[in-house]
């Protein structure tokens, strides 16, 4: 199974809970089937809902989840949900933009309580659906996506200029496209790269100067990759480090612990003070530099035997950035 981040789980929960509230007494199995998840996953999500509430966390300040002996689930919202919100126009617009994306979660009732609430909010703000607020998936040009889909369907290799974010460099690649897919707000090309002599995934919005080649692909795609909706997404999401790739251990403050969800980590250990020790595999130094600059004082290098200058990477990178501004 593909790795599910906390953001993915929150998005799923925010879509499931309103539907259960509006449809009390539905069976757990039916709810799980509607939203495309297993019963175990749904029950784990509902277990989190028990902890939602406000101090002093008395029964009237907590969300109540009940599952009877027949496996029927009912959610009763706490009293504070009945209090009207006082939103500024900017807050309302932000709420509308973020909540609108929840309607794309499989199983969401397009005419349910969430959709009706969004319509009311639109009317109050004087907005028009699909004109003022729109949720787009990725920044890739539609024409580029269509050319990649055509190349994949026609078994034709493509040559492209590609920007590698991790290495901060442009390279020319010849790729046999297998599949175009969307994940976490971006479009990706999955295929066989001649230069790497292996299976690779490319961000479509980092592709430039795409040219279709007349030669047929020398590397066939796995069976059914283009047509099967059950293509194993774990193959697409698992990070395979290169042999001998260096590793670094960071001490992450609470505000920096998103790193363990955003990037593959090894040996994540939680300390008694709430900080995390996490070991990351480093694919390229420019990527590590940007990460350390972004984290700032919220991350401390604990182990750097394989990267002798790791402790000064962030400061050195910051100095180069300042020099460019000067």
Image (spheres, rainbow, N blue to C red):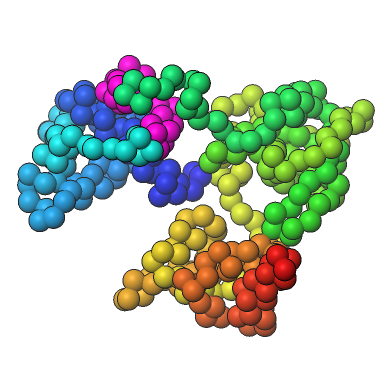
Q: Label the magenta part by its dominant secondary structure.
A: helix
Left or right: 187 with respect to 134?
A: right
Q: Residue furthest front?
A: 326
Q: Quadrant of the C terminus?
A: bottom right
Q: Residue furthest top?
A: 111
Q: Which residues are magenta?
A: 93-122
Q: Is residue 138 above or below residue 260?
A: above
Magenta stretch: includes residue 205? no
At x 32%, y 38%, the residue is 88
Quarter assignment of residue 165: bottom right
Depth check: give the residue in front, 48 or 43.
48
Quarter assignment of residue 86: top left
Q: Give the x, y percent position of residue 190.
A: 69, 39
Magenta stretch: includes residue 99? yes
Q: Residue furthest left?
A: 59
At x 90%, y 31%, the residue is 213
Task: Using the rendered image of the protein, determine whether residue 38 is visible from the camera's viewpoint.
Answer: no
Q: Is residue 2 above or below residue 315?
A: above
At x 55%, y 58%, the residue is 264
Q: Give the x, y percent position of residue 69.
A: 12, 33
Q: Give the x, y percent position of residue 132.
A: 48, 25
Q: Is residue 32 above or below residue 255?
A: above
Left or right: 319 with respect to 151?
A: left
Quarter assignment of residue 36: top left
Q: Give the x, y percent position of residue 80.
A: 14, 41
Left or right: 291 with respect to 177?
A: left
Task: Using the rendered image of the protein, determine whether residue 100 is visible from the camera's viewpoint.
Answer: yes
Q: Is residue 5 above or below residue 283?
A: above
Depth check: give the residue in front, 64 or 138.
138
Question: Count of labels shown?
Answer: 0
At x 31%, y 24%, the residue is 124
């Amino acid at each position: 199974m593909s790795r599910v981040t906390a953001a993915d789980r929150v998005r799923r929960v925010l879509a499931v809970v309103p539907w259960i509230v509006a449809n009390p007494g539905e069976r757990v199995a039916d709810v799980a089937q509607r939203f495309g998840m297993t019963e175990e996953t749904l029950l784990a999500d509902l277990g989190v809902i028990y902890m939602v509430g406000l101090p002093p966390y008395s029964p009237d300040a907590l969300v109540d989840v009940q599952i009877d002996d027949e496996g029927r689930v009912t959610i009763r919202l706490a009293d504070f949900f009945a209090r009207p919100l006082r939103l500024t126009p900017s807050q309302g617009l932000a709420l509308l933009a973020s909540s609108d994306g929840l309607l794309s979660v499989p199983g969401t009732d397009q005419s349910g309580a969430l959709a009706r609430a969004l319509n009311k909010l639109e009317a109050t703000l004087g907005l028009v659906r699909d004109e003022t607020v729109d949720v787009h998936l990725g920044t890739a040009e539609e024409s580029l996506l269509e050319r990649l889909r055509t190349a994949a369907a026609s078994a034709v290799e493509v040559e492209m200029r590609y920007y590698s974010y991790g290495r901060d460099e442009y390279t020319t690649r010849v790729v046999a496209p297998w599949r175009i897919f969307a994940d976490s707000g971006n479009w990706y090309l999955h295929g066989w790269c001649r230069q790497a002599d292996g299976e690779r995934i490319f961000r479509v919005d980092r592709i430039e100067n795409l040219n279709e080649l007349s030669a047929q692909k020398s590397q066939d795609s796995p069976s059914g990759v283009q047509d099967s909706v059950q293509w194993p997404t774990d193959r697409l999401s698992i990070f395979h480090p290169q042999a001998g790739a260096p590793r670094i251990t960071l001490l992450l403050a609470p505000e920096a612990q998103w790193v363990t969800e955003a990037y593959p980590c090894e040996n994540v250990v939680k300390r008694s003070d709430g900080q995390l020790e996490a070991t990351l595999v480093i694919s390229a130094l420019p990527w590590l530099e940007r990460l350390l600059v972004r984290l700032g004082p919220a991350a401390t290098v604990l182990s750097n035997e394989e990267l002798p200058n790791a402790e000064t990477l962030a400061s050195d990178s910051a100095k180069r950035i300042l020099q460019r501004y000067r």
